Structure formats: structure tokens, C-alpha cells
Image: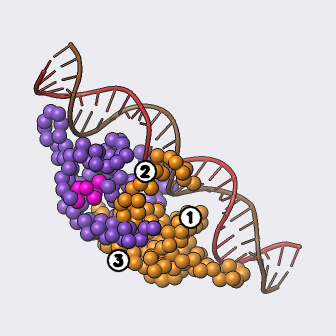
Chain colours: A orange, B purple, C red, D brown
Amino acid sequence: MRKENSTNTLNKQHLEKDCGMSYTLTAIGGRWKPAILWRLARGKMRYSELRDSIANVTERMLVLQLREMEKDGLINRIVYAEVPPRVEYELSAKGNSLKPILESLSDWGDKNRI
Amino acid sequence: MRKENSTNTLNKQHLEKDCGMSYTLTAIGGRWKPAILWRLARGKMRYSELRDSIANVTERMLVLQLREMEKDGLINRIVYAEVPPRVEYELSAKGNSLKPILESLSDWGDKNRI
DNA sequence: CGCATTACTTACATTTTTGATAGTACCTAA
DNA sequence: TTAGGTACTATCAAAAATGTAAGTAATGCG
């Protein structure tokens, strides 16, 4: 939970407000977000498929990151009224528009890390 | 200071190791790094110029972020043996190769934030 | 009833990041 | 001798992010 009025939060908001780069980096920069986005860029996936394909992620972190990206409109959450439950995640149009950026981030990383 | 063997650190290393995107995002994703990179993309700057042009940044955070980017090879630190001291920062070749990515991050952010 | 399945929650602990504040080193010029 | 300018460090505190472990809800099936 963020405090509304901490310097930390205010600085963050200020930067995101007048720096598009900061905004984008916050949207895709959580610990597990790249791993999730990378998979969803290849197609719709169930919660359990994400969980099982991302090594070492905890359910708590997975859900947190999914919720943030849903709130930011990057992904859609599709719930089927079944038992046992079935939930699928997919990139939204906004999320899809990130694809070329994700690829260039990935390429640059592969090229430049040691 | 990071603990060598915390799960947190190990997860981070693991992700950066086999996900170029994670590596890149760590390299440019610190709180003040976008603001710094944005300025240096327009040319060499002195420490004091960076400090004075970035609202609300503390010297501690500025130095921390500069050091990290220097360590990652994104920027060069040029020290002139003068008194009072003069230190300039500029993008390295590696840093320069990020420019198109920084621009697309910035554009996407400007287009998509609310 | 009791169990299995799926997609989560909750409460708490640890680690990491960020911020506040004060201090340092160096020389030069007054 | 003291003040000034520049680029920092050091110490401590607060806040945020991440991790651990256990629990929940719904329902069909045996």
C-alpha cells in the first residue's frame, strides 16, 4: 500500500506526470511483469498456466502484478462462470501496442548484457 | 546494499539472466534514471546542471543513479582535475544505442497515460 | 459427507529502495 | 584566516516491494 502523501509517492507521481518514459516504465517494470507480458504476447493464458510457466513466482506476486497491469489497462481478465473456476488473461489493445517496445527492450538486453 | 543470497536477489538475477527485457528494465528503470537519461540524450552535462534541472532529486539519489548507470556502462563520467571540481556526464556508446528505445517508451507513455 | 480442483486472499516477515540531513575534501581568492 | 564553490559521502529513518505460509470459496463427484 502506498501512502498518499509521502515524498516518495509525490516524487513518483510528479515524474510520471511529465515524463512519458517514467509512466511506461512503471507500467511494465514490476519484477514479474516482463515475464507475464512476454507470455501473453504469444497468446491468451490461464492463471495456472502463467503460474506454472514462470519459475519461482509466488501466487501472491503473480496476482499483484496481474492486478496492476489490469488496472493500467494492459491486460484483460476473462472469467468463466465454471467450477472449478477458469480465468484467462490476454493482452488488451493497449497491451498489444506495447509489443514492438517489448521486443526492442528484449533485443537490446540480449545484445548488451554481459 | 543487496544481500547476496536473499530470494529476492536470486529471483532478480535469474530473471535478468534469461530475460533481456528484465535486464534492460533494470538498467534504465530506477526512479531518477529516465530523467537523467533524457537530459544526457541531449548532450553532456555537469553534475550541478543535472542536480539543478531535475526537480526534487536529492544529491544522494542523483549520485546513486549515476553510479549505477556508470557501472552498467550507460554513461561516462569525465573528471577534470580542477578546483573547484568539475565533472561531466555523457551517454556512452551503449547508452546512445538506447536512444530509440527511450523515445519509443516516452512516446508510448505520452500517448497512453490518462 | 469428504475430497479434489482452481484461482485466488490474508497476515506477517524480510529485503530493498528512497528520502532527510549533515558533513567532507580540495584549492583559490579576498 | 576564512569563506566560497563543486562534487560528492555518511548516517539514519521511512516507505515500498517482495517473499513465506497458510487459508478460503464454490461445486461436482464418489
Q: Which residue is mark 1?
A: A64
Residue A1 counted in the magenta span: no
Residue placed most toward the observer, C6 or B95: B95
Mark sitting earlier along the chain (2/3):
2
Q: Position of residue B47 (x, y in %)?
A: 24, 44
Side of A2 relative to A16 (left or right): right
Q: Which residue is mark 2?
A: A11
- Write down the quadrant of residue A62 in the picture: bottom right
Under mark 1, the amino acid is: Leu
Up-down relation of residue A31 to residue A88 (above or below):
above
Segment colored magenta? B36-41
Q: Position of residue A34 (x, y in %)?
A: 44, 69
Rounded to the nearest whole Å, what is the CA distance between mark 2 and mark 3?
A: 29 Å
Residue name at image x 33 percent, y 70 percent? B107
Give me the C-alpha separation between circle 1 and circle 3.
Answer: 25 Å
- Residue identifier under label 3: A100
Mark closer to the chain start, 1 or 3: 1
Nearest the viewer among B24 and A78 is A78
Residue at 20% x, 50% y: name it.
B45
Frontmost residue, A20 versus C22: A20
